[in-house]
Image (spheres, rainbow, N blue to C red):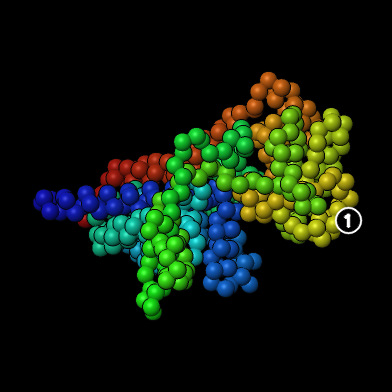
Amino acid sequence: MNYKETLIKALAEFCRLLIGIVFLFSGFVKAIDPMGFEIKIGEYLAVWGMEGFRFLGLTVAFNLIAIEFSLGLSLLLGVYRRYTSLLVLAFMLLMTTLTLYLVLFNPVTDCGCFGDALVISNWETFLKNIVLLAASVFVFVHHRRLWPCYSNRVRWFAPLFAYACCLYFAQWNYKHLPLIDFRPYKEGVHIPAQMSIPEGAPEDEYRYAFVYEKEGVRKEFSLDDYPAEDSSWTFVESRTELVKKGYTPPIPAFVIYDREGNEATDRILGHSGDIFLLIAPRLEEASDEHIDEISNLYDYALEHEIPFYGLTGSSGEAIGDWTDRTGAEYPFLETDEVVLKTFIRSNPGFVWLRNGTILKKWHHNDLPGEETADRLLRVYREGIAGNEKRNDWIYISVFTFTLPLLLARIYDFLYFRRRKKRPVNAG
């Protein structure tokens, strides 16, 4: 093999690794939080005036996640090299076109390509896609030079297994809370501290311009030299431009109101001791399948003198409908729906606070019973419970996914080794 051929093969393998890792990471982090990706798809549909198709958001989210993940794995393992490289190229052409549209018109602040795990600007996303598109072209042109991990006999297993596993993993995270919480409302976070701005933190810098007119001629002035005392100039308009973005706290705002419109933030975040919150971003769409469990938690709170509030972004009418339908006796407070969707990926979800700190969060499918609440109450008296069990599940998930792929590779190797040892019949 000559020098040029070696260089081309090395570049092709590098591009294969780059695209495969990015696709795997992107699919994995979105599978951890499929509800977040569904919300992002809903933003796109709203921008394009296609809100009537929101009911397809979850189906589209699940399948896009699984397709991206399986393409990344297929490219890394070198299976169906021609078709995989072609699909990756088509995918990157579509994504690059989309991000060019985002750069030009800025309909959403970020494309959501890495979910909340890694938020990058539209320009950064576009540049990233340009690099991946160029790598995709190179991989497609030189796909025959990629090393295949599996033979033709076994190669079908990898993409189908990856697609099925990713769908299952995304569905599990959708029906429970995300295995990894990438948002600022993690367990153990003190919310007021996440809302505060450190002393000396950089502030937003603006440029102010003032347009005045004199004798039919318009001129733009700065804040330092505008003709405030010269009556011969007539004010036309002012412009404000953000020059440099200052420090933004992880939680920009979390303002809570009672039913009468009075601010009640301190009642929740400033409360000394434990407090239970039933969080429902939209009560109109909230699941009412676990009303008995919620009622039991409310009774537990009354018994242990723990304040219990419903927190929603819905209107007073929706609150009334929920109360009539479920017989809820706990009071409701109101805040922004988007904030609550960020707080917990469940509608409704249950949150245990202590002194403004998030001790524990539950999906409505995993609401704690009285025994669990008693055990946690004892644990929290000694400190905040950790996430060791959740971290164990991450390791188990990775092991469960990689083991069948490894076994398929071993079977493939042993099968061809046996075939190689068979004597060849003469004649």
Residue 327 visible here: yes
**372 or 161, nearer to the observer:** 372
Q: Is residue 269 above or below residue 72?
A: above
Residue 181 visible here: no
The extreme bottom residue here reads 216
Residue 6 relative to residue 190: left or right = left
Residue 73 relative to residue 166: left or right = left
**Residue 402 coordinates in the image, percent (x, y):** 46, 41
**305 or 202, nearer to the observer:** 202
Who's the residue at 84% across and 31% down the image?
305
**Residue 18 coordinates in the image, percent (x, y):** 33, 50
10 Å neighbourhood of mark 1: few (<14), some, or many (≥20)?
A: few
**Residue 294 coordinates in the image, percent (x, y):** 81, 43
Who's the residue at 39% across and 44% down the image?
409
Who's the residue at 12% across and 53% down the image?
4
The C terminus, quarter of image:
bottom left
Q: Which residue in the structure is indicated by mark 1? A: 324
